[in-house]
Image (cartoon, rainbow, N blue to C red):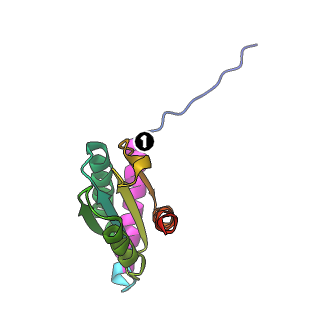
Amino acid sequence: MTETTTYTLIDGRKVSNDIKNEIAQKVTVRKQQGKKIPHLAIIVVGDDGASQTYVDNKVKACKAVGFHYTMMRFADTISEQKLMKHIDHVDNDDDVDTAWAAEVERRSQEIKQGIVRPIPWAAVKAQARKRVRARR
């Protein structure tokens, strides 16, 4: 006797769109009720193409579901002090719910290799503060 396995083909694009539509409906209800709309802050340092594609997709997703977003772009020559000032500003902004940093290059020696990765906001702050303390 042979066992038969059945597989179900999932349309990932449809599932993604269904989820986005569900979120958009919830955001619409929040707006109608006068509640806060989720707000994403994005900080981009440098001009790497892969990072830009990632950020563009985040902005597109925010627009699709009705989230607010703030985009901050800085040249890779920004000083750590100025970048930390912007990070602190976003961190203390009660309107911002979450933040992501797409870091293309850091001015510190260990990232001169051009590593690009989105990382959680808390990790950005922790890393930046660690670098500042290490320089003292």
Q: Residue placed at 46% from the left, 62% from the top? A: 124
Count of picture labels:
1
**Considering depth in this image, is 129 or 99 the residue closer to the camera?**
129
Q: Is residue 27 above or below residue 92?
A: above
Q: Is residue 122 above or below residue 10?
A: below
In the image, residue 19 lies in the stretch drawn in magenta = yes
**Considering depth in this image, is 59 or 85 the residue closer to the camera?**
85
User: Residue reaching furthest bottom?
Assistant: 34
* Magenta region, residue range: 13-30
Q: If the image is split into quadrants, where does the N terminus sit? A: top right
Q: Residue placed at 43% from the left, 69% from the top? A: 98
Q: Position of residue 10 (x, y in %)?
A: 47, 38
> Which residue is label 1 attached to?
12
User: Residue reaching furthest right?
Assistant: 1
Q: Residue placed at 33% from the left, 49% from the top? A: 54
Q: Position of residue 108 (x, y in %)?
A: 39, 54
